[in-house]
Amino acid sequence: MIHVIILAIVQGLAELLPVSSSAHVIVAEKLMGLNPGAPEMTLLLVMLHTGTMIAVIVYFWPRWRQAFFSSGPQLRNFVTGLIVATVLTGIVGGGIIELIEKVLMRGQAHAWVEQLFSRLDLIAVALALAGVFILVAGLVENRRGTAAAARKLAPAQYSSIGAIQGLCIPFRGFSRSGATISTGLLLRVARSSAEDFSFALAVVLTPPADAREIWRLYQSQHHHLAGMVPAAAPSIVGMVCAFVAGLLALKWLSRWLETGRWHFFGIYCLIAAIAVGYLHHTGF
C-alpha cells in the first residue's frame, strides 16, 4: 500500500505537469524494486490515469464552460478542434506504433510497443527532447509577450497540436502536456487557451489509452483476470491519491504558465534526462 501511495503521488503530480509522468513512474517503480511490466502494475497505472483524468475535469470544467460553452460558435470551434486533433493524434501515434510493432519488433511474440517503455536509455532521450522543446517555447513566449496571442484556436493550430500529441503516445518521457502546450505557445495561442485545449484533449485520449492497457492486460493473463481482484482495492486507493495530487499539480502548472515560468519545466526535464541517463549507464 505504501508503494501504491508513493506511485499515486508521483503519477498525480507528474501526469499533469509537463515532465512526463510515465518516465517518473517507471523510474520510481524500478527504485522500489517493482516490475513495471507486471499485470498488477498495469492495472494500477490505469486506475492512476483515471484519478488524474477526474482531477482534470474537476479543475478545468469552470474554465471550459466559460471559454468553450458560452456561445454556439465557440462550442462548434472547440468540438471541431477536439475531433480534428484527436484524429490526427490517432493517425500519427497509431502509425508510429504500427511501424514499431510490425517492423522494428517483427518476429517477437506478443509485440507491444509497451515492451520498450521500461528502457531508461529511450526515456532519457525523450526527456531531453521534451526539455529542449519546452525550454524553447517558454523563452520564445516570454520574449514575444502575450499581446499577439489568440484565444480562439485556428484549424492550423489545433491540427498541429493534435499531430504533436501523436508523437508523444509511443515514447515514454516525451511529455504530452509539455509538447501540446508548447506547440500552442509557439503558434501564438494564448497561454490559458493552450492549457485548456491540451487538457481537454487529455480527457478524450485517456479512456482509449486505458482501454488499450486493459486489453493488453487481458491478453497477458490468457483472457482470465480473476487474479487481478486482490489488486483492485489498492488501485482504488491509488486513484484517490492521484486525484488529490493531480489537483495540486494543476494549480502549480497554471500559476507557472501564466507567470512566464513555463521554461523552468524544460530545465527540469533536461536535468531529469541526465539523471535517467546516468541510471541507465550504471546498469540500473
Image (cartoon, rainbow, N blue to C red):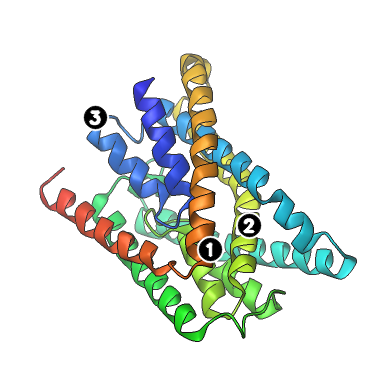
The residue lying toward the viewer, choosing from 115 and 77, is 77
- Tell me which numbered mark, 2 or 3, is placed earlier along the sequence: 3
Query: Which residue type does callout 1 highlight?
Result: Gln
Residue 29, image x and y in percent? 30, 35
Reading the image, the residue beneath label 2 is 201
Answer yes or no: is residue 37 visible: yes
Residue 178 picture location, percent across and down: 46, 62
Instruction: Pick the quarter of the image with the N terminus.
Output: top left
Secondary structure found at label 2? helix
**For mark 1, what is the residue?**
165
Query: Which residue is outermost to the left?
Result: 282
Which class describes the residues within 10 Å of circle 2: few (<14), some (14-19), or many (20+)?
Answer: many
Label 1 CA crowd tier, 10 Å (few <14, some 14–19, many 20+): many
Circle 3 residues within 10 Å: few <14, some 14–19, many ≥20 = few
Marks 2 and 3 sit apart, C-alpha to C-alpha, by: 33 Å
The percent coordinates of residue 90 (x first, y second) are: 60, 60
State if disc 3 and disc 1 touch (CB < 8 Å).
no
Image mark for residue 33: 3
- Which residue type carries mark 3? Gly
Q: What secondary structure is marked by label 3?
A: loop
Q: Is 215 left or right of 82, judged from the image as shown?
A: left
Label 1, secondary structure: give it: helix
Q: CA distance from mark 1 to mark 3?
A: 31 Å
Identify the mark nearer the N-term, 1 or 2.
1
- Residue 284 is drawn in which quadrant? top left
Q: Position of residue 279 (x, y in %)?
A: 17, 48
Disc 2 residue type? Answer: Leu
User: Mark 1 or mark 3: which comes first in sequence?
Assistant: 3
- Residue 223 visible in the displayed image: no
Name above or below for residue 101 compared with residue 256. above
